[in-house]
């Protein structure tokens, strides 16, 4: 009998969790002989995304996985648990200088230009059919604020900075310290199409290479990455 494949099982967990089908997610999870950090993170992420923090914190889930899940979903409860949330950070190199952005960062010398560019990008993206994925914001705030919070993610600030400071056609390369959220993923994909730029984002687990609105993954990829 063929040994069930960990990558495939992780992909299934990721898919069911992304669809909010937590019963099916748990069935696959509990049937697994071996689990790795991808399995744990996917399942906890699913629960936290649905706001089921209590289930995500059950004893059987590791605290590390819970924290990662909460942090990925931008959930303030990571702080309530007395644990410092890892802030999302994106870096981009330009003319041999590394520029670092945190979500909502306003202290960069070009911050004004960056936020003007983000507004323009938002207009262009919406014309191209982009819908902000407000599920990526796990905050108790209004719809408009959620949209604004999404635009200020560190990856988008770095993308806007890259667009302003490089010539047309030059690839934009960003390094992230945590996994990229769904919304930043969607934006990067559209940016690569609308502005004809290659966008390469290396996050915690893999490298996402966007070109002409399509995605190529390298690293620890799953067949379902295009959903993220
Ligand atoms: Zn994001």
Image (cartoon, grey):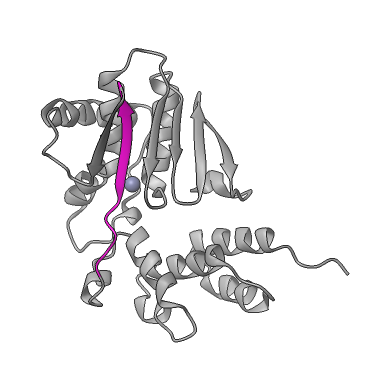
Q: Is residue 134 left or right of residue 34?
A: left
Residue for point 39% across, 49% down: 181
Query: Looking at the figure, which quarter contains the N terminus?
Result: bottom right
Q: Is residue 216 left or right of residue 4?
A: left
Q: Position of residue 140 (x, y in %)?
A: 20, 64
Which one is nearer the viewer's eye here, 55 or 86? 86
Residue for point 18% across, 48% down: 144
Among the 4 quarters of the image, the one containing residue 175: top left
Which range of residues does the magenta coloring cover? 84-95
Q: Is residue 20 left or right of residue 63?
A: right
Compared with 91, 54 (above or below) is below
- Does the magenta run of residues contain 205? no
Q: Position of residue 57 (x, y in %)?
A: 39, 80
Q: Position of residue 40 (x, y in %)?
A: 51, 70
Which one is nearer the viewer's eye here, 195 or 72? 72
Residue at the extreme bottom? 59
Residue for point 68% across, 77% down: 31
Residue at the extreme top? 168
Q: Position of residue 206 (x, y in %)?
A: 52, 46
């Amino acid at each position: 009998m063929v040994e069930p494949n960990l990558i495939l099982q992780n992909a299934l967990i990721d898919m069911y969790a992304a669809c909010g089908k937590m019963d099916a997610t748990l069935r696959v999870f509990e049937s697994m002989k071996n689990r790795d950090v991808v399995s744990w993170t996917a399942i906890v992420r699913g629960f936290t995304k649905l706001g089921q923090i209590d289930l995500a914190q059950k004893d059987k889930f590791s605290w590390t996985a819970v924290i990662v899940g909460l942090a990925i979903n931008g959930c303030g409860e990571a702080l309530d648990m007395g644990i410092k949330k890892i802030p999302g950070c994106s870096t981009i190199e330009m003319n041999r200088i590394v520029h670092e952005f945190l979500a909502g960062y306003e202290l960069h010398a070009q911050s004004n230009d960056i936020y003007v560019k983000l507004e323009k990008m938002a207009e262009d993206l919406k014309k191209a059919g982009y819908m902000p994925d407000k599920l990526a914001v796990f905050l108790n705030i209004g719809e408009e604020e959620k949209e604004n919070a999404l635009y200020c993610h560190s990856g988008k600030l770095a993308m806007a900075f890259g667009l302003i400071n490089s010539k047309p056609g030059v690839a934009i390369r960003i390094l992230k310290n945590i996994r990229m959220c769904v919304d930043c993923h969607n934006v990067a994909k559209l940016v690569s199409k609308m502005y004809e730029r290659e966008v390469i984002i290396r996050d915690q687990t893999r490298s996402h290479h966007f070109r002409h609105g399509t995605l190529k993954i390298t690293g620890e990829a799953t067949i379902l990455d295009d959903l993220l």
